[in-house]
Amino acid sequence: MRIARYSREEFLERKFDYRSGEHTGIWEPTQGGKTHLMYQMADVAMRRNPHLRLVSAMPKSRSPATRRWADKLGLKIIDDWPPKRSINKPRGYVLWPKHLKDAPVEQNRAHLSGVFRKMLHDQYQQGNSITLADDIYLLAVIYGLNMECEEFWTAGAEGGAGLWGPNQKPSGTIGGGSVSSFSYNSPTHLVFGQDTDVRNRKRFSEIGGGIDPELIASIVPSLKRFPVQTPEGVKTISEKLYVDKRGPFLCVVGI
C-alpha cells in the first residue's frame, strides 16, 4: 500500500488539523524526536485554537529541550499549581515542580504527584485545555496518576479537555506496569516513530477506530532515521507515521 509522504512543514501547516478535546498519542523509543514534534504540533494547535489553555507537565528533574520550547512558544515555567495571577498572561505554562533534594524516593514522588494531580484536576474540570504529559509513563505509572489520565481519555473530549501523551515503551515494563490501554484507543491523533521491538508493536492492536494494526506494524519498523545536529549533540531522528482516526488518514512525516 502506498502511503502519502509530507515534509514536516507541509504536514504542520496543511495536514494537521486539531480540534478542541481531541487526544494525541505519540510512541517512539527515547531520543527519536517525539518531544520536538509534540511541541511543533502544540504550537499549531494553539495558533488555530487560541481559546485553549495549554499546560505542559514536566516530571523530569532536567530537560534543556523543555526550556528552549518554553522560550520559543511563550510558555511560563512554574513550579506549583495553580499559577499566580499576573498582568501579562502567558500563552501557556510548563508545570515543572522542583524535586526534593536528599529526600527518599517515595517522598519525592508523592510530592511531585500531588502537584501534578492538582493541575490535571483543573485542566479536566475547566475544559477547553491541552495538557502535554512529557512523558506519560512517568506521570501515569511512576507518579501513580493513571486514573487521572483515564479521566481525560474516557470523559475529557466533551468538555474540550485534550491529553497529549508521548510514551517511550508502549509495551510497559516488567514489574513497573504500563500506561492505561485507553492511551491507545482514545486519541484521535497518533504518531509513531521507528520501533523495531515486536513487543511494542503488538500493542497496536488496541488502537481501534477502523485502523488496521497490521498495517501500522508493517510501516513503523521501516521508517527511516537520520543523524541531526541538535544543541545536545548529534541525534538520530526518525521519520514519523501519523494517523488521524477521523478519516482514517495516514501519512509519513519527514524530519
Image: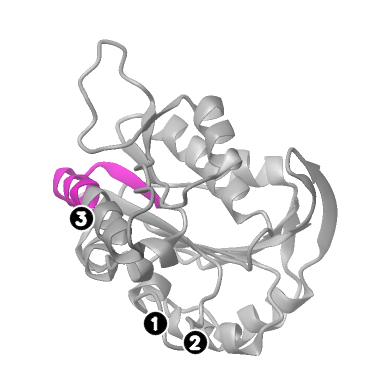
- Residue placed most toward the observer, 192 or 108: 108
**On residue 177, which mark appears?**
1
**On residue 158, which mark appears?**
3
- Circle 2 sits on which residue? 205
Residue 222's quadrant in the figure?
A: bottom right
Q: Position of residue 179 (x, y in %)?
A: 38, 74
* Residue 81 falls left or right of residue 139: left
Q: Secondary structure at mark 3?
A: loop
**Which is more foreground, mark 1 or mark 2?**
1
Marks 1 and 2, how far apart at CA: 19 Å
Q: Kindly indicate whether the residue at mark 1 contacts the one at mark 3 (C-beta within 8 angstroms).
A: no
Q: Earlier in the sequence, mark 1 or mark 2?
A: 1
Q: Earlier in the sequence, mark 3 or mark 1?
A: 3
- The residue range painted magenta reads 117-132
Instruction: Give the residue type that dot 2 points to.
Output: Ser
Q: Secondary structure at mark 1?
A: loop
Q: Secondary structure at mark 2?
A: helix
Locate the N terminus by quadrant. Answer: bottom right
- Residue placed most toward the observer, 185 or 225: 225
Marks 3 and 1, how far apart at CA: 29 Å
Q: Main secondary structure of the magenta part?
A: helix
Residue drawn at x 45%, y 40% as measured from the top left: 45
